[in-house]
Image: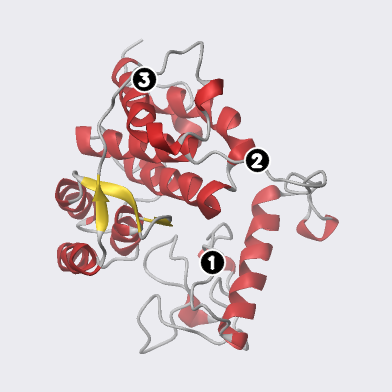
Amino acid sequence: MDINECPHEDSIRRGDPAPEGYGHAMEEALDRLRTTGFEFGGFFACHAPMAAEALGELGFAEAVPQWVEENRRLRRYTERPGPRWTIEPDDWREHLGEFGRVGDWAAMFERELAGQPWCDVLAHWWPRLLPGLVGALGHGVIRTAHAVRSVASAADPTPLQLNELAQGLGYWASRYQEPLGAPSKLFADVPAASGGRPDQALYDLSVTAAGFYADRAPQPPIPLAHISPFRPPSTWSCRSCRPASTSSPMCTPAGRRPGSPVSSRGCSGPGR
């Protein structure tokens, strides 16, 4: 099978076209970030590739280069580590959660993506990594998800896009951490109120967390939830919550730019 062909493609490929300038913005951002490490300050995740992708998705592609440069100036990121030793297919389990080998993990996924369709690699690995998604406050799976949306937006993903997917998967694997203590409810049954749909349950949880954050403004000022735009924008009740981009993760009332604080009252969009 050609590595550009994938039997899972129809279930992963986005159904709507990417916003204007999205692809070019991602290429420029990823090129600027090719030597940027995974964290800063000891354990804070590098948000640069994730935020750049989100800006492009929200229709602000022209703002991506300046934002990336400003972010790199303000954050003292470590250099991206290269591989030191090879992680073999039969010994991967023993290296889960070894952040010191993040470069080895990323290199392994680069090899995987060079020889197989990207969606096959993703389908093979995400079930293996899912139990450890709480590591790094979930930013391994979040970075992977942004990378997936990027490659899924391209008919022929570029080397930089595929490399970012490898970095996301590598970060996820190297920060792998299963919940500690009592048996986790992380994978509990989907609540009946969500109609038995995991996507709706995650959406409801995200909206609740975002509303709590907007109303209470807890400290430190870093929300521990990344809003997930699973509900189609056509179902949002307030008209101003229906942006041009069909996967905008924030409510954007008139005159408010995406990403600014919104009240949780009077809006049933994702920023409620």
The amino acid type, in three-letter code, at marker 3 is: Glu
Instruction: Identify the residue shown where x is 67% and y is 72%.
Output: 208
Mark 3 vs mark 1, CA separation in Å: 38 Å
237 relative to 136 in the view: left or right: right
Q: Position of residue 237 (x, y in %)?
A: 60, 77
Provide the residue designation for mark 2. 178
Nearer to the camera, 117 or 247: 117
Q: Nearer the viewer, mark 3 or mark 2?
A: 2
Q: Within 10 Å of the Cα at label 2, are there few (<14), some (14-19), or many (20+) other Cα atoms? A: some
- Mark closest to the chain's N terminus, 3 or 2: 3
Provide the residue designation for mark 3. 112
- Mark closest to the chain's N terminus, 3 or 1: 3
Q: Position of residue 186 (x, y in %)?
A: 73, 48
| Quarter assignment of residue 130 | top right
Q: Secondary structure at mark 2?
A: loop
Instruction: Identify the residue shown where x is 31% and y is 13%.
Output: 2
